[in-house]
Amino acid sequence: MQKVAWDGGTRWLHVGLSTTLTFELFGGFLVSDPNTRLYFIIHEWGGLLATSILVVEWLWIYADGQSKILFPWNREGMSLIKTDILALFKGKLPQAGRTVGLPGFWHGIGVLTMTGLAITGVLIFLVIPGGRGASSSSAGAADFTMLSGVHREVSYIAWIYWIGHVSASILHQTRGDPVFRAIFLGATKPRK
């Protein structure tokens, strides 16, 4: 059961990242066709907005001391993740919220995946052929093609993350854990 309400900064960053990532993932389906140039432009500017929010997220992770929760890559953290996974096979969900274990680790995977998308997306933006990026040479076209391929591969991981994250949230909510209220309203108990 969700025991800790999320603080305002985390909630706003979650809204910003979840909105921009969802928009970018679904918008990504529209950018591969050369006839959809407008969608590509919207996608790249949406990606730059998401990158800006992600930079603030990294600063927030550092300032709020969330590294040990999101990246529990030590013996104790891996043991807690293993315990949470084994509990899933017994039908027990791990505690949602700011806990070291599977939920924190999964959020960390999401932050790293979004960072991969942001880095490759910004690099793509810088080498867009045709004079809009930093390079309009034929080398820019080769770099654009290579980076676009990497960006697409990372987006597959982002889809796995997004589907897993949304599914786990819905599962928690249906089992009586008010995760939506906690992350979007900052409350773990219904308001009277």
Image (cartoon, grey):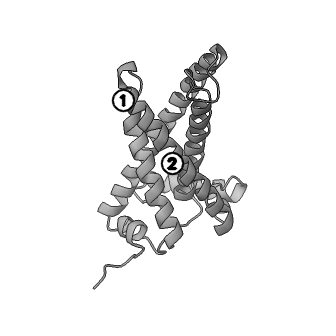
Q: Is residue 80 left or right of residue 6?
A: right
Residue 95 visible in image:
no
Q: Residue at x 57, y 59 (%)?
A: 101
Q: Nearer the viewer, residue 63 or 73?
A: 63
Q: Residue at x 51, y 53 (%)?
A: 86
- Which picture quadrant has residue 148? top right
Q: Residue at x 72, y 54 (%)?
A: 74
Circle 2 residue = 50
Kindly identify which numbered label has been placed on residue 30.
1
Above/below status of 55 relative to 131: below
> Three-letter amino acid code at disc 1?
Leu
SS for dot 1: helix
* Location of residue 22 in the rendering, given as x and y in whole percent from the top left corner: 40, 45
Above/below status of 120 relative to 60: above
Q: Is residue 174 left or right of residue 168?
A: left
Residue closest to the far front: 131
Residue 49 visible in image:
yes
User: Which image quadrant: the N terminus?
Assistant: bottom left
Residue closest to the far right: 74
